[in-house]
Image (tube, coloured by chain):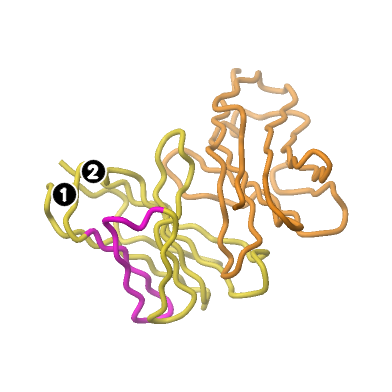
Amino acid sequence: AQSVTQPDIHITVSEGASLELRCNYSYGATPYLFWYVQSPGQGLQLLLKYFSGDTLVQGIKGFEAEFKRSQSSFNLRKPSVHWSDAAEYFCAVGGTSYGKLTFGQGTILTVHP
Amino acid sequence: DVKVTQSSRYLVKRTGEKVFLECVQDMDHENMFWYRQDPGLGLRLIYFSYDVKMKEKGDIPEGYSVSREKKERFSLILESASTNQTSMYLCASSLLGQGSYNEQFFGPGTRLTVL
């Protein structure tokens, strides 16, 4: 069965600092990987996705993620965090039929001024 | 612009009531999904549908049912609401395709409180 682990429940960074959110997955074949962001009281918005090809993928809002098959990881990064990035971030893996996704537990990001 | 709408943002119901949560998408997507979101547990799939009148159980279907009579509409039903069903409910939709490389588009969510 596929699974996703986000080891960090809550991360706090200062505005302007770099950010890395960790995601580890378990899946038997080539995974399809996603990062979503959820602002308070809102639904989820797709930040970026990986299907194949270049293992470094660029997303919206200045985010990027790197797929590392050997480590079963898909970590999300941003070089300089803005206060508006404060939100909850979800990593997800897919690969079964009908477009089902399995989500991680989420990481809450707090940004200090 | 892609849009998934949910009938209510906030809902308060009493134990034992029958509850309907409605979701509508305007993207002509085949797949539709219902999740519940609880702190520390992420999103858990309740039911999904890949076609009109077709439904499949997700990871936590107990206490829920669904209905999909039209392609654009997917309803989640709580036959007899209980306090442990107090949660945020998220609807999503996606195109039908091979594998899971189709992005899911989410609605704003319905925060349900059962008293």
Query: Which chain gets the orange colouring?
Result: A
Residue B86: x and y in percent read 27, 43
- Which region of the structure is painted magenta? B60-78
Residue B91, labelled with which disc? none
Q: Nearer the viewer, residue A54 or A110?
A: A54
Colour of chain B in the image? yellow
Pinpoint residue B44: horizontal percent, then vertical percent.
45, 49
- Residue B13 marker: 1
Quarter residue A8 falls in: top right
- The residue to which callout 2 is attached is B113
| Quarter occupied by the C terminus of chain B | top left
Q: Position of residue B82 (x, y in %)?
A: 19, 47
Residue type pointed to by label 1: Lys
Instruction: State the CA–CA distance, disc 2 to disc 1.
Output: 6 Å
Q: Is residue A1 magenta?
A: no
Earlier sequence position, callout 2 versus callout 1: 1
Q: Residue at x 60, y 18 (%)?
A: A113
A70 lies above or below B17: above
Q: Secondary structure at mark 2?
A: strand
Do labels 2 and 1 touch, CB within 8 Å?
Answer: yes
The secondary structure that most of the magenta stretch takes on is strand
Q: Amino acid at mark 2?
A: Thr
